[in-house]
Amino acid sequence: MLEYSAKSGSPEKQRTACLVLGIFETRKLSPAAELVDQASEGLIGSILRRGDMDGKAGDTLLLHHVPNIQAERVLLVGLGKEREFDLKAYQKAMVATVQALNERGSTECVSFLSELPVKGCEFPDNLTQAVLSIENARYRFDQLKSKRDEPRRPLRRLTFVIPHRRDLLDAEATLRQAAALVTGINLTRDLANLPGNLCTPSYLADQARKLTETYPQLSTEVLDESRMEKLGMGALLAVARGSAQPPKLIVMEHMGGEAGQAPVVLVGKGVTFDTGGISLKPGEKMDEMKYDMSGAATVLGLLSICAELQLPINVVGIVPTVENMPDGQAIKPGDIVTSLSGQTIEILNTDAEGRLILCDALTYAARYKPDVLIDIATLTGACVIALGRVPSGLWSNHRGLANELTRAGEASGDRVWEMPLWEDYQELLKSNFADMANIGGREGGAISAACFLSRFTSEHRWAHLDIAGTAWVSGEKKGATGRPVPLLARFLMDRATRRNA
């Protein structure tokens, strides 16, 4: 991670290896750029008039020997049209800054982009978004490569200039908070990017235990197969039967609030590899099924953020984790299992396994008497078809909770879109032989999956996040995104702020 700091001051007086200034389309100088232009007797304006730069979003131009200023160099960064300068454009400018300076010999810089008003984003949120976008662009998962490509002289320190000196303490606190968010997001990404032969249920349990070594205020308990059998987790254990990897139920607690305060309980789907079982998936892109534990990785990332920031609320993370494989012991279509809740389930498709492990974990969560209960799961391909890869799908049985998550999504840039949870859809789960089927057919597949989970959460204020479209990207830049950690971290921090108000 870069070293981040904040300061106030005038651009022409900054002693730095590189001064970062913004230029809007078409060739309109930002306020800080105007001050440097005046100090340099019109040098920047003359360069722009010659056509070296127009101000298009993401364009950069590095200037040397700018007269009458203290900085060694000046980097001009295109911001696009001023009236359209929103969070997305701001993030693009921040990423362009770091990409332009890596390997240019500027190991540190002072950026005046943080002074700019960003549509829909208030100070100090713009500092958080700057750090998150920069570190997202810098992230590499290269731990398993024998040779790593690293910049020869990368940027190491970035100072943000803030508009008013009175905001300096708030800015520094925001940067510390942003650093904690990056650590949690990167933990989530690292876990999700690991291959299935390394990241097993036992490995996830070990990583949860290691977090308690880093953060003694966290506690972790891991339930093994025998304990789950005694409890009656028939749905979860049914999924694990086809694998040589033993299942685990990981329970983590961050009790930063008052004793007796009802906790936020987060349940993350942890299928460390999903072949589909007997209902075998197509071979194409099956390698990406290592990401089927992204909900679990999200929970671990969030608990690390809670501990790092010492949030004054109680948070419990529950991770049911298994591997879904098709051996001779595996469950078959038509099998009927009994869940921890006592409800029976006819398994019509063994590739709808996530809801089977989640339903037992959601029932287990009831012992904590949660204030709210939220599950996070790469649950259905149908959600990707419905919403694409922009928002995560949201279902909830409580209007206030749904609104709270939606607001946190807008504020963090990690958005959700609420989907219906109408009683009409429950008809899709009818079974002739059990209390319910585990699938409801092709139509409304993401909704019927949420309806299935709702049958185990009716006594709680509950929300379900389907992150199948947002937890990772495919193609040339394949990898975990770390979503929805920004969304849920904002949700938890907002709750902590209200507790302290």
Image (cartoon, helix red, strand yellow):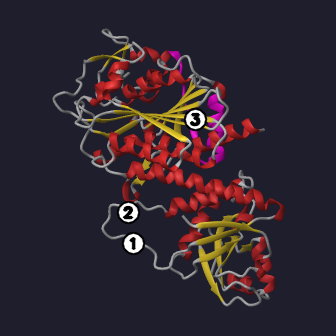
Mark 3, other Cα within 10 Å: few <14 / some 14–19 / many ≥20? many
| Residue with the mark numbered 1 | 149
Q: Which residues are magenta?
A: 401-423
Residue 421, relative to residue 297: is it above or below? above
Q: Secondary structure at mark 3?
A: strand
Q: In the figure, is residue 31 to the left or right of 337?
A: right
Which picture quadrant has residue 302?
top right
Residue 142: mark: 2
Q: Label 3 sits on what residue type?
A: Val
Residue 121 coordinates in the image, percent (x, y): 71, 52
Q: Give the residue at the far top of this rendering.
A: 432
Is there a contact, CB below 8 Å, between mark 1 and mark 2? yes
Q: Quadrant of the C terminus?
A: top right
Query: Going 53% across and 17% down the picture, which residue do you hit?
Result: 458
Q: Label 2 sits on what residue type?
A: Asp
Residue 406: mark: none
Is there a contact, CB below 8 Å, between mark 1 and mark 3? no
Q: How many marks?
A: 3
Residue 315: mark: 3
Query: Going 35% across and 24% down the picture, which residue do you hit?
Result: 228
Q: In the figure, is residue 118 to the left or right of 388?
A: right
Badge 3 or badge 2: first in the primary sequence: 2
Q: Tell me if residue 420 is in the magenta stretch.
A: yes
Q: Nearer the viewer, residue 473 or 252?
A: 252
Q: Label 1 sits on what residue type?
A: Asp
Query: Going 68% across and 37% down the picture, which residue do you hit?
Result: 495
Spatial separation of the CA atoms under disc 1 and disc 2: 9 Å
